[in-house]
Image: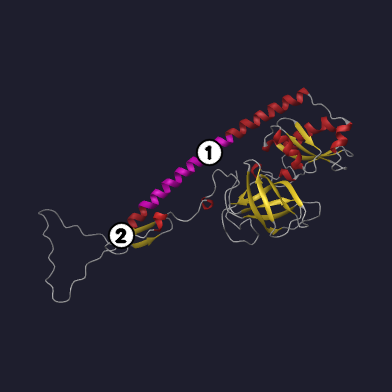
Amino acid sequence: MTVPSKLHSPEGPGAGRRSTRISIAIPITISGKDANGRPFKENTRTIILNKHGAKIVTVHQLALGAEVLLENRALGRTAKTTVAWLGDRPTAREPAELGIQLVEAENIWGIELPPDDWQEGPPPKEARKEASPATGPPATVTSATAHVAVPAMSATAAPPGPHPPALSPAPSPGVPIASQPPSDALAQETFKRLTSQSDQLLAGHLRKLEATLTRQAQQASAQAQATLQEASSRYEKGLEKVTKQQLDEMSQALRDYVKLAVDIRRGVVAGGGALHADCETILLKDGSQQEDVWGADWVPTDQKVTFEALINIRPRQNNRSMEIQDPAIRRRIEEIVRPLLEGV
């Protein structure tokens, strides 16, 4: 489950609080001109995001303030951004983190239940109209969860001069005269009532959230069982080994190793791209699901599979680094890749 945290904005390590940020990997495409003025287009993904921008990773060198066009591939939506800050690049071949800021803040990410402050905006026109009661301005009692307006008591000013004593109305027989409660007691009573209503509303939201999480957990469990059953069936049927010519073609982009994208549910592999994201795109177009596709490398000289790829950064699947952490997923990738490539 993704847990939003309201810390520094992803627009920069030292930026102030603007909107709640969420750790989630969403496939995106960025394009523009790099620091040398050369056009580029890259498939990558987010690391942290909020309504105003995101922290992403890229293999290109970009300049601070550069204009970058962002595309959410899953939704087919685009937005203009600028480079807000640049992270350190360990080596020229390794990707770097950077922050992009949306020119117009919006939920381009498609988050279905965004935090409340993503939806903040100017108050409605009715709220900006000031009331002008005949009895004077209301006195306001402010609390952490409610604002209670209590009308102030007013009286018409009496003209100067002597006045007759005020007469109190005579009570009915057997009926006591009720004293009027002070305004602060009325405010406290109203505050308690609003607090109780807020607690009930919060409890209702928590029950809905719990039901949603339970349903998602059940769906994930059912999907995992279906994945294992289909994977087992495909493995028992056997896989067709690639030819030497096919392996040579896949090795043209990077001669020492082959970048792969592996669908662990369907048991299929795409390889030979300059980036793991290129191979991933091929599988997605072929019907694979994002959560089933993982990045790996095949080293022909050592006959070895490695499990480090940029597309593996996906906190929502409990994998927060480029290297695959789950031993079961690593074994499944080995089961698919080795029968195809080993010994060729």
Mark 2 surroundings: few (<14), some (14-19) or many (≥20) residues within 10 A: few
Q: Nearer the viewer, residue 268 or 246?
A: 246
Question: Helix or strand or loop: what does disc 2 sit on?
Answer: helix
As drawn, 230 above or below 323 = above
User: How far across and down, in percent of the image, does residue 266 sit?
Assistant: 71, 30
Please name the residue shown 64% across and 52% down the image: 80
Residue picked out by circle 1: 212
Query: Is 211 contained in the magenta span?
Result: yes
Provide residue 224's location: percent of width, then percent of height: 65, 32
Answer left or right for 218 relative to 251. Answer: left
> How far across and down, in percent of the image, does residue 199 sit?
42, 48
Q: Residue at x 77, y 53 (%)?
A: 38
Range shown magenta? 193-217
User: Which residue in the protein does label 2 denote?
Assistant: 185
In the displayed structure image, the side of residue 206 where residue 172 appears, left or right: left
Q: Is residue 344 visible?
A: no
